[in-house]
Image (tube, rainbow, N blue to C red):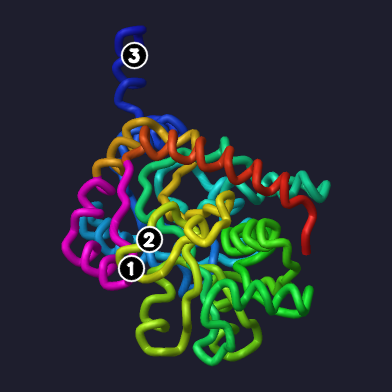
Amino acid sequence: MNRRELLKAAAALPLAPTALSSAAFAQSPFPSRNVTMIVPFPPGGQADLAARPIALALERILGKPVIVDNRAGGGGGSVGNAAAARAEPDGHTLLMTLSSLAVLPEADRLFDRPVAYEVSQFAPIARVLADPTLLAVPASAPWKTLQDFVDDAKKRPGEIPYGSSGPYGTLHVAMEMFAASAGIKLLHVPFRGAGPALAALLGGTVQAVASAPGTLKQQVDDGKMRVLANWGAARVPSFPDLPTFRELGYKDVEFYIWAGLFAQSALPAPIMKQLREAMAQAVKAPEVIKTFETAGSPVAYLDAPEFAKFVAEDSARLVAAVKKIGKVG
């Protein structure tokens, strides 16, 4: 066989397995399989409220199932956040999480623990919700106003239990900001998420909780809970008669519980572009808008560039708040 015949025969041979798989991977469309949306909390909280209608809308837009994976644990969402950070950056594992994303690494450092993940491992895709937290108590509680609550707490330091989504999670930080400003000491009872904390409030295990309007509205409307104050700078449309902490004299008490979708920072730009475009459509879906508005948490969409700026600014404020709070149980 001469050289020309040899080259012709070689050209007819199948590609080596590694070359074939690389070419197939490069040309593989996104998504090529089911998409997992990790929610680092149990069902019933703000992140779960955001994830479920958005997942259904994305499923229709992307043409593949989008599965919500409630992966709670570690306090404040650290287990689910860390799992998403370690996932393959191919767009098939996303994270719907809360503002505690930036707080938890700082809390790890505060307690000299191994840091579960860094915020730099994530790329913001879109903000979905952004609500101030509200202070809720059982409808049967004796406190009719925030002043009633503060006066009682001063008489019984460390005796009024409140629930949170875990140490240094969104609900914990909000309550400790208020307690520090009011000069009171409360008893922190951590749970694996806002859903279990709210269940504990209804069951009488705890007597107070900070949570988003969307997770509280139905319970308040049903006469099972009472809200005493709002951590926002302005009143919430779904609770127009509820005063803000600022109105009540607590000028440094302001806290928002936002929910947003993230991917890994190494996500290829074309896939990020596709996800951003899909999210821009998803938040306009009538069923998404209706679900959020019914819950009292209207869509608060920000695209990736604006969301990234928002996260940076909010994270700086929250990290400063955690440092000011210091080590608390």
What number is the disc on residue 240?
1
Extreme residue toward the top, this view: 3
> Could you tell me the amino acid type at mark 1?
Pro
Q: Is residue 233 left or right of residue 191?
A: left
Q: Quarter of the image containing the N terminus?
A: top left
Q: Which residues are magenta?
A: 278-302
> Could you tell me the amino acid type at mark 2?
Arg
Q: Considering only vertical position in the picture, is 140 above or below 287?
A: below
The answer to whether mark 2 and mark 1 are in CB contact below 8 A is yes
Q: Nearer the viewer, mark 3 or mark 2?
A: 2
Q: Position of residue 146 (x, y in %)?
A: 56, 72
Residue appearing at x 58%, y 76% in the figure = 197
Q: Quarter of the image containing the C terminus?
A: bottom right
Mark 2 nearby-residue class (10 Å; few <14, some 14–19, many ≥20): some
Query: Within the image, what quadrant is residue 315 found in?
Result: top right
What number is the disc on residue 235?
2
Q: Position of residue 267 (x, y in %)?
A: 44, 36
Q: Which residue is mark 3?
A: 7
Q: Position of residue 120 (x, y in %)?
A: 57, 35
Q: Is residue 1 left or right of residue 316?
A: left
Q: Considering only vertical position in the picture, is 165 above or below 234?
A: below
Calculate the distance from the C-alpha at mark 2 to the C-alpha at mark 1.
Answer: 6 Å
Q: Is residue 37 magenta?
A: no
Q: Considering only vertical position in the picture, is 279 above or below 297?
A: above
Residue appearing at x 81%, y 50% in the figure = 111
**Front position in the image: 315 or 134:** 134
